[in-house]
Image (spheres, coloured by chain):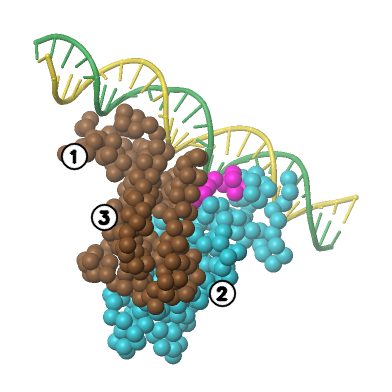
Chain colours: A cyan, B brown, C green, D yellow
Amino acid sequence: MAKIKSGNNTTKKEAVLEKAALLFKTKGYSAASMRELAIALGVEAPSLYNYIGSKTELLHSICFKIANEFFVNLKKVENSTDSSIAKIESIIRFHIQTTLSRFNEVYVANHEWKHLKEPFFSEFLNFRRNYEKRLIILIETGIEKNEIKNLHPYVTVLTILSAVRGLEFWHGHKKNVLPQELENDMVSHLLNGITK
Amino acid sequence: MAKIKSGNNTTKKEAVLEKAALLFKTKGYSAASMRELAIALGVEAPSLYNYIGSKTELLHSICFKIANEFFVNLKKVENSTDSSIAKIESIIRFHIQTTLSRFNEVYVANHEWKHLKEPFFSEFLNFRRNYEKRLIILIETGIEKNEIKNLHPYVTVLTILSAVRGLEFWHGHKKNVLPQELENDMVSHLLNGITK
DNA sequence: TTGCAAAACTAGCGCATATTAGTTTTTGAT
DNA sequence: ATCAAAAACTAATATGCGCTAGTTTTGCAA
């Protein structure tokens, strides 16, 4: 049967990962089957195991790759000399841009990570909590410096993270709103709500 | 074995539904098994079928009960004589309150509805789209009346709905923030961001 | 105390799953 | 043309699933 097609600069494993992200997003990790994934790649299910170790490894790869990218960005922002508001804006824009350009992977990392097996489940959970905590510190600093309104920092972070996560439901509306317009309007909404 | 316990004013079917909502939320609909649900109720799996028709019926009941409550509230708000901003505020508060008080069911309705079978899948999807569309109209009216900033209405609705949906991740922090404080701060953030 | 319906049980069917083992085909460099 | 490695295949295993059938137990009303 036909070989797994992979774009010129991607390995076959990456081709599998890409299809897996789409499938996991569409059907959910548990309901997605390796047979289905194989069919999507034009291949029989056992052939997949020439490239990958297991179904759970696919989920692991997707989740931690995305988590790492967000974390790298966070560190970059933390080390900048921007104002608190500018830092928050930068993080919001990164979330929006990454979510729009890496739709399937971001969705899986956000919604299917709970199917990770231990110890990876706990590792990922700590990752999230740490990320959230460091955003709270960013907000707290902004409040102390009188840049940001004195709302409860955790609520502010939750509101922001939830709002950008909601872009996963964005899909079919691309025709009516340009990505740049979406990004600017959402940033405006979220920042105007907390800027002093 | 022990009978299924149900609170004084609830039927046994409702007891099953309540546990099902918790289980579907924790493990996801597909990964949750009827055997597991039965154990949580102190019973063997086939006994459940004395009360319910099928696993998918459980999901259906949870999703449409919640959807209906949100819809009833929406109609009430639409028919009021409040300003546009007050209408939006009212809807945001309803979302927050319902999410906090009906945690598991709201989570399932928001995240697991995609496992509904046709024709219920499409019915639920139309429900959501209709709800969203009517919120957009509310926003558009507010912009025309010069109450609300001229951001793209769809983006505004997406931001608001996403933010309140994020309360599903609220859980463990109840000790540090009172629900009333949470509600007021989130409402403040979301409304200040769009009020003219 | 009897009788009957509600609600539990045990056994098991049919099906789908992830994965392994072993084998064959395809591919590309020499 | 050769030959080894890469990548596909077929077959099968063990497991778990939702659910049904048929039977026994339980609990309340008479």
Secondary element type, mark 3? helix
Q: Quadrant of the N terminus of chain A?
A: top right
Crowding near the residue tagged with mark 2, few <14, some 14–19, many ≥20 C-alpha atoms within 10 Å: few
Q: Which chain does the numbered disc 3 sit on?
A: B
Task: Give the amino acid type for the residue marked by disc 2 in the picture.
Answer: Gln
Quadrant assignment, res B189: bottom left
Task: Give the amino acid type for the residue marked by disc 1 in the picture.
Answer: Asn
Q: Is residue B195 visible?
A: yes
The residue under label 3 is B101
The part of the chain drawn in magenta is A27-38
Give the alpha-carbon distance from disc 2 to disc 1, as whole Å: 53 Å
The residue under label 2 is A180
User: Residue D29, relative to residue B102: is it above or below?
Assistant: above
Please determine if labels 2 and 3 lie on a single subunit.
no
Give the alpha-carbon distance from disc 2 to disc 3, as whole Å: 37 Å
What's the residue at 32%, 59% (across, down)? B80
Tell me which label, 1 or 3, sits earlier in the chain: 1
What's the residue at 38%, 31% (across, down)? B53
Give the alpha-carbon distance from disc 1 to disc 3, as whole Å: 18 Å
Q: Quadrant of the C terminus of chain A?
A: bottom left
Q: Position of residue A127 (x, y in %)?
A: 40, 68
Q: Position of residue B104 (x, y in %)?
A: 32, 51
Quadrant assignment, res A80: bottom left
Task: Give the amino acid type for the residue marked by disc 3 in the picture.
Answer: Ser
User: Residue B151, relative to residue A40: is it above or below?
Assistant: below
